[in-house]
């Protein structure tokens, strides 16, 4: 059996339909009401998991962050997170709202205080962002909770990822790995699905997937074809929202399409190059067998002048055996346009 992890009742691995995570993140811009509207849309789309981001800014960043402006913004990262963070009461309310709709609530903690808040909220699992992949003190802290972890690995090397992997293995914490490119949006040529497969080859006993920041579902669907079990995209109810991650978000329609299409591609995976038993009905008419194309007397030699290959494939002697019959003699008189039988051959 392929490796899997389990969050509540949902098993996640190559033997199960891909899990699509709708990341509302900070697209609510700090509004609980907007966050609930995003949850409503994710529910309508059929999402199983809604992912939030837990920011306790004072514990997450030093004052130096007030001078760091992300590539997809015009104000500092400190200001963005301060504006977009939900307080504890609102986040508890959001978790309850998600769960009342039958979906799983998970979140990314960006600090020790955030991880502790989520633990107090009794979340089922943790998502860890790429920026924390090499934050080994925080990883050890989260691993200590023993809850399943989905770890994004963008901006990291296999060497730095391996250190994170060892932390979770040492703690006995179930985890999965996601390849990511942390550009918002990610240009198509920088998706690098080969890096995802390399990640899987390096850690074959760990479920894997893609956290995607492109502008459509193609990268995620390509990832499923290569074996991905988890797909994560930012999510919004409509693309007219404002916010730093809206540009690379999927809306309700795109999320619904991703869920359906990823299941279809999952069903297409695997198999062996041999006829499926269900193809027999087609084989019967599509394959050719050896037939007479002229009347043949008893003792006459079979040649291309009196036998050839024709549909359907219901005769005894397949087209691939045609040359084996040439030069042999007929055991009886055979009419024209008859499917040749092995008993017709001396």
Image: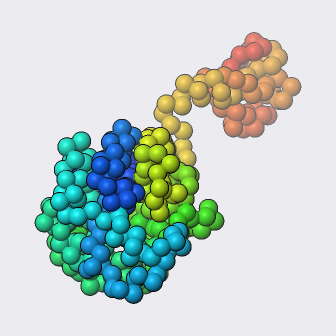
- Left or right: residue 85 compared with residue 70: left
Q: Position of residue 150 (x, y in %)?
A: 32, 65
Q: Quadrant of the C terminus?
A: top right
Where 315 falls versus 56 (above or below)?
above
Where 213 falls versus 104 (above or below)?
below
Tell me which corner region of the image, top left, top right, bottom left or bottom right, holds residue 282: top right
Extreme residue toward the top, this view: 335
Tell me which corner region of the image, top left, top right, bottom left or bottom right, holds residue 203: bottom left
Which of 208 and 2 lies nearest the eye of the viewer? Answer: 208
Where 329 falls versus 245 (above or below)?
above
Which of 129 and 28 lies nearest the eye of the viewer? Answer: 28
- Left or right: residue 277 compared with residue 338: left
Q: Position of residue 287 (x, y in %)?
A: 66, 29
Q: Residue at x 51, y 69 (%)?
A: 73
- Left or right: residue 136 compared with residue 215: left
Q: Residue at x 22, y 59 (%)?
A: 91
Q: Residue at x 47, y 40 (%)?
A: 253
Q: Quadrant of the N terminus?
A: bottom left
Tell me which corner region of the image, top left, top right, bottom left or bottom right, holds residue 87: bottom left
Which of 25 and 341 lies nearest the eye of the viewer? Answer: 25
In this view of the protein, can residue 321 be seen by the observer?
yes
Q: Residue at x 43, y 50 (%)?
A: 236
Extreme residue toward the right, this view: 305
Q: Position of residue 25 (x, y in %)?
A: 36, 60
Q: Position of residue 217 (x, y in %)?
A: 53, 50
Which of 164 and 50 lies nearest the eye of the viewer? Answer: 50
């Amino acid at each position: 059996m392929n490796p899997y992890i389990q969050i509540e009742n949902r098993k996640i691995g190559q033997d199960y339909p891909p899990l699509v995570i709708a990341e509302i993140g900070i697209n609510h811009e700090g509004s609980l009401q907007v966050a609930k509207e995003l949850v409503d849309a994710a529910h309508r789309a059929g999402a199983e998991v809604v992912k939030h981001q837990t920011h306790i800014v004072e514990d997450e960043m030093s004052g130096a962050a007030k001078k760091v402006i992300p590539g997809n913004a015009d104000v500092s990262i400190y200001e963005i997170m301060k504006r977009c963070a939900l307080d504890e009461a609102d986040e508890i309310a959001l978790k309850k709202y998600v769960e009342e709709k039958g979906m799983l609530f998970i979140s990314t903690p960006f600090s020790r205080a955030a991880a502790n808040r989520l633990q107090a909220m009794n979340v089922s699992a943790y998502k860890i962002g790429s920026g924390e992949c090499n934050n080994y003190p925080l990883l050890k802290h989260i691993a200590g909770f023993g809850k399943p972890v989905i770890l994004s690995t963008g901006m990291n090397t296999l060497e730095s990822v391996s250190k994170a992997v060892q932390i979770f293995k040492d703690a006995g914490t179930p985890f999965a790995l996601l390849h990511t490119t942390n550009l918002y949006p990610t240009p198509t040529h920088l998706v690098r699905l080969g890096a995802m497969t390399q990640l899987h080859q390096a850690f074959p006993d760990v479920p894997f997937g893609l956290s995607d920041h492109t502008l459509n579902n193609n990268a995620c669907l390509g990832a499923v074809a290569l074996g991905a079990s988890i797909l994560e995209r930012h999510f919004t109810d409509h693309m007219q929202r404002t916010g730093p991650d809206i540009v690379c978000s999927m809306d309700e329609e795109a999320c619904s399409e991703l869920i359906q299409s990823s299941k279809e591609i999952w069903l297409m995976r695997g198999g062996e190059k041999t006829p499926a038993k269900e193809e027999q009905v087609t084989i019967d008419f599509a394959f050719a067998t050896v037939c007479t194309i002229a009347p043949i007397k008893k003792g006459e030699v079979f040649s291309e002048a009196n036998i050839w290959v024709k549909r359907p494939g219901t005769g005894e002697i397949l087209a691939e055996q045609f040359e084996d019959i040439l030069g042999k003699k007929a055991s009886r008189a055979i009419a024209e346009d008859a499917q040749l039988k092995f008993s017709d051959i001396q």
